[in-house]
Image (spheres, rainbow, N blue to C red):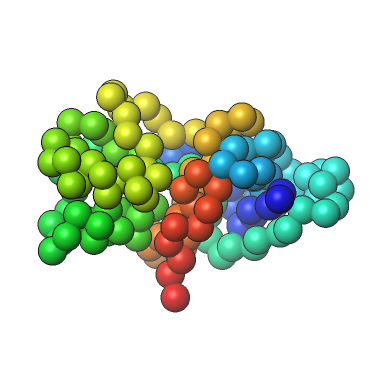
Amino acid sequence: MLTLHTAALLRRDPDGESLPDHAVLVSGDRIEAVGPLAELSSAYANARVRRWPGTLGPGLLHDGPLPPAPTPRERVHALLRTGVTAVLAENLADPALRAAAERGDLLVLATAVAPTLRSAGRADLAVHGVDGACLVTVVAGRIAHRRA
């Protein structure tokens, strides 16, 4: 199933320019296209459209120790609540924590790589509100966190 994710603004990378009226087309766990909403809506008329408030961008990379919580699953969920979709392997030395990260489909990286939205890339997205709070986290094409 194709899904168009769109927000008031779209940012292809964390430091990039914010573009109005743009969207990300997702198929399964991959990004099919990134571009103007009008063009993608026209070309993929049967796609489900998810409109989010705030700024849509790539999921974030967490490059430090995971936040404390009672269980490994809760530590991973604490990251998802902030828009994180990738972690560095060096911060997952505990096998239970690594297993929780893998179950949550977090991308485990050997080295830091700047997140970006690009065609054929993994569909890891985050939407942040004007106050900076994460509203939605999409991991490998599925919504893993949605603020109530």
* Front-most of residues 17 and 1: 1
Quadrant containing the C terminus is bottom left
Task: Give the residue drawn at x 56%, y 41%.
Answer: 29
Question: Residue 146, percent across and down?
Answer: 46, 66
Along the horizontal axis of the image, is 21 left or right of 85?
right
Task: Give the residue drawn at x 64%, y 62%.
Answer: 51
Along the horizontal axis of the image, is 98 left or right of 141?
left
Along the horizontal axis of the image, is 11 left or right of 74?
right
63 to 70, vertically: above or below:
above
* Front-most of residues 128 and 27: 27
Q: Point out the residue furthest to the top here.
A: 111
Task: Give the residue drawn at x 56%, y 65%.
Answer: 53
136 to 97, vertically: above or below:
below
Answer with the quarter of the image where residue 36 lies: top right
Answer with the quarter of the image where residue 17 lies: top right
Answer with the quarter of the image where residue 70 lies: bottom left
Question: Residue 89, percent across and down?
Answer: 24, 32
Task: Give the residue drawn at x 53%, y 36%.
Answer: 122
Q: How many marks?
A: 0
